[in-house]
Amino acid sequence: MLGHTRGKRSPVTCALKCDNACSKAVCNTSSNSYFRDIASAEFSRRSALGVGAAGALAAAVVVVGGADPAAAAGVAAKKHQPGKLAFDAIKPVDAKIDVFDVPEGFEWAPLLRWGDPLFNRSPEFDFENQTPKAQAQQFGYNNDYTDIIRSKNGKKGVLVCNHEYVNPEIMFPAAPANAAEERQRRNIFRNAVGLSVVELKRKDRGQPWDYVRGAHKNRRITLDTEFELTGPAMGSDLLKTKRDRRARFVEGTLGNCSGGTTPWGTILSGEENFNGFFRTAGTSAEDKRYGLENKATAMGWELEDPRFDARGEDFANEPHRFGYIVEIDPENPNSTPVKHTSLGRFKHEGANVIVADNGHVVAYMGDDERFDYLYKFVSKRKYRKNDRRHNLTLLTEGDLFVARFSGTSEAEIDGSGDVPSDGKFDGSGQWIPLVEDGKSRVKGMSVEQVLVFTRLAADEVGATKMDRCEDVEPSLKSGKIYVACTNNSNRGVGSNAKADEANPRTENRDGHIVEITERRGDHTSTRFNWDLLMLCGDAAQGDATYFSGFPADQVSPISCPDNVAFDTEGNLWISTDGAPDGIGYNDGLFRVTVDGRNRGKVEQFLSVPRDAETCGPVIHDDESMVFVAVQHPGEEGSFTEIHSYFPDYVPSEARPAPGEVRAPRPAIVQVYATQ
């Protein structure tokens, strides 16, 4: 990644999380624009034929009241007027500082850390004596999407968390001594990804949680867990392999990033950067469109399991079995999780659903790659309250759409980020059908091809190229949909797509938020209106920013929006991934007012440690509690040069002695009010 990262963005993340995507040619080479039809994508012969504990830890952590003002730009501390969770916005923290910072009146503690034992038989975590068997029984690495489902009395809960990828350089105190140890580590990595389901308990609402070791619902889902395929592509020749000649079941899940919780209590998880785990021939149009290559992978799993080497016919289709939305039932530890082909295959950041007024379930999804697309799924069947068995089938069949945007002031968009003369970035849009009423709406492609090669199908119909749609979530209060476009440094560069009103900045370093309003308030409509809630950045550094008219000098600087969530008042909460590169501060969690006179006001609630990313925000403002997943803390360091001591901070005078192992561990953090 030398020459492709800027500022303090870690090239480690690029290599391990997304296989250095930004250093490679853009996968989407289609020439589609707003209303331009493109030539049919040619399918390779192979694809056409289908061949191919809080209390105990509280004393060990440090609550920091703010960064060194000489190292961080200040934000005027003002009380938030409305809302249940009142706080003074913190100052941004310089990217070289290793703290977890929260507002005055709040404390924080880790709830679950990488390696925490989940079962009675699980061994205690030991940096120097890790094994694949132990990791399969412990909390996984690099926690991302998180939710906590509370019981009615609020004293019990179930936490579900994704584990996206691993950081080998900071997981072990020394390099592997021999080939046998290297192989063991590869198998530890396999068992460190996937998902965790963990029961929680506490004394009362508003109190910090403890996790329950050995609880009935505790579960680890790994690459050895069997998943069942659902939907129209189940049984397709495109998904058959030597181990699964009926295309019915898949071993494991990969690259699990964000997700969502359904009204019937299940968890949706997005398989995102799966391509970097496979070695393929890399010559077909489909392989190239999904970033699949003929090269050794970072994890080296192709050396352990032939299904990760897709160069031969036996497992040529194995990569086609990843890149879906998976559904997990946290209430039933013996249930078989599923992969829903009806929601398409791409680099799913996640999926979030809402029940439309007519009873159909609508899922919104983003494809997290430069110049890829925004999608919507509408279920064929209708939601039935209190009929969980029926509702578990809702995502198996329905219509799949991709978004096309047009702006009201396109002629004024020059890539600078300057606001058009009408005072806002806005326009209308259309949901273009890919699959509708059980039939393909893409010329020359079958339903199975559309759902397995969804990116190529979307290219065909002229979808709008976006700046990395990450989390996409509807507000249950307003019904509006919010799209976090993280960034796209390639926008307008060379022959790449130019700036447009929905993506108005050339070399979009800091990202933006799109707000969508479905026509007539109908989430099943094929028409929508849109505007931009914000163009992120730091006005004090000269960035071209926009906050829906709210004064740019009165907001917390924010860069690279990633995951979003809502509180009970309808405020939008944004976690960031990449702020060190964008504005030079550590990533954090921010609250944004979305309506009224303070629309566009951004207030930073917390800041995560050095080199870390903020993920999986959970907002329980009715209890003045907030939860985040802290991913890859200190990842630019090593055991000889530790960048972060999160989450087990110790006073500076008690730093580890020479030879003592104490390194960063990804963790779920709970933040709670003390007054």
Image: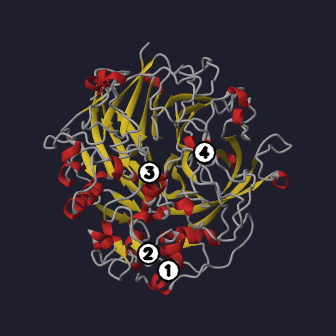
Pointers 4 and 1 in contact (C-beta within 8 Å):
no
Q: Nearer the viewer, residue 68 or 275?
A: 68
Residue topped by disc 1 = 283
Residue topped by disc 3 = 257
Q: Earlier in the sequence, mark 4 or mark 1?
A: 1
- In the displayed orientation, state which residue is furthest to the top: 675
Residue topped by disc 4 = 481
Q: Residues within 10 Å of mark 2 (few under 14, many from 20)?
A: some
Q: Secondary structure at mark 4?
A: strand
Q: Would residue 188 be found to the left or right of residue 93 on screen? A: left
Pointers 2 and 1 in contact (C-beta within 8 Å):
yes
Foreground tag (1 vs 3): 1
How far apart are the alpha carbons under marks 4 and 1?
38 Å
Q: Nearer the viewer, residue 424 or 165?
A: 165
Q: Secondary structure at mark 3?
A: strand
Q: Earlier in the sequence, mark 2 or mark 1?
A: 1
What is the three-letter code of the residue carrying label 4? Answer: Ile
- Which residue is at a point 34% across and 70% down the rendered structure image? 308
Q: Residue 101, position in %: x, y?
A: 47, 26
Residue topped by disc 2 = 294
